[in-house]
Image: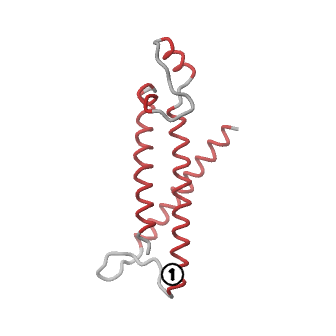
C-alpha cells in the first residue's frame, strides 16, 4: 500500500512539473505587449476574461496544493528515523520525535538526508510564494 502512495506522490509531482514547464514555455514563446514586456494571455470581453482569470486562479491553486502535498510527504519520510537510527540514539541516551515534524530530528538524521530536506524546504517555500504572486497578479 505504501508503495502505491509513494507512486501517487511521484506521479503528482511529475504532472505538476510538466504542467509548469509547458506553461512557462508557452508564456516565454508568446510575444510581449508593445513596450510593457508583459505577455497577454487572453483578450476579449470583460466577462470572458474574468472567467478565464478565475479558471487560471483555480488551476494555479490546485497545482500548488498538489505539489506542496507531495513535498510535505517527502520531507516527512526524510525526517523519519529508521529502526537502526532509533536504536543507536537510545543507546546514546538521545531520542527522536516520532509522528510529528521536528527540527530536532533534522540534526539527528544522517547528513545524506539533510541536503534533500533543505532543498525540498527551500523549493516548496519559493514555489508557494511564486504561485501566490502569480495568482495575485493575473488580473
At a point 53% along the width and 37% down the height, the residue shown is: 76
The location of residue 135, given as percent across then percent down, is 45, 66
Q: Residue at x 40, y 52 (%)?
A: 126
For the C terminus, give its image quadrant: bottom left
Please identify the residue farthest to the top as the structure is shown.
91
Q: Residue at x 44, y 25 (%)?
A: 108
**Where is 69 relative to 21, above or below?**
above
Left or right placement of residue 68 versus residue 7 in this view: left
Q: Of helix, strand and loop, which one carries label 1?
A: helix
Viewer-closest of 4 and 128:
128
Q: Quadrant of the N terminus?
A: top right
Residue sitting farthest toward the bottom: 45
Q: Position of residue 34 (x, y in %)?
A: 32, 83
136 versus 15 height, above or below: below
Circle 1 packing at 10 Å, graded few (<14), some (14-19), many (20+), is some
Tell me, what colour scheme is on the image? secondary structure
Depth check: 127 or 103 in front? 103
Question: Where residue 134 appears, x then y in whole percent?
Answer: 42, 65
| Residue 73 location, quadrant | top right
Q: Quadrant of residue 98?
A: top right
Of all residues shown, which one is farthest toward the left? 35
**Pointer 1: what residue?**
49
Residue under the image location 47 percent in, 33 percent down: 102
Give the total number of marks visible in the rendering.
1
Amino acid at each position: 500500500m505504501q508503495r502505491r502512495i509513494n507512486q501517487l506522490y511521484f506521479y503528482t509531482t511529475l504532472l505538476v512539473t510538466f504542467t509548469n514547464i509547458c506553461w512557462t514555455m508557452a508564456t516565454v514563446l508568446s510575444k510581449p505587449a508593445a513596450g510593457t514586456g508583459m505577455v497577454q494571455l487572453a483578450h476579449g470581453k470583460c466577462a470572458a476574461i474574468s472567467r478565464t482569470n478565475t479558471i487560471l486562479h483555480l488551476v494555479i491553486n490546485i497545482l500548488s496544493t498538489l505539489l506542496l502535498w507531495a513535498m510535505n510527504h517527502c520531507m516527512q519520510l526524510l525526517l523519519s528515523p529508521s529502526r537502526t537510527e532509533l536504536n543507536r540514539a537510545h543507546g546514546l541516551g538521545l531520542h527522536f520525535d516520532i509522528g510529528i515534524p521536528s527540527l530536532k530530528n533534522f540534526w539527528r538524521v544522517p547528513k545524506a538526508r539533510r541536503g534533500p530536506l533543505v532543498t525540498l524546504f527551500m523549493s516548496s517555500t519559493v514555489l508557494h510564494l511564486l504561485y501566490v504572486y502569480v495568482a495575485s497578479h493575473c488580473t
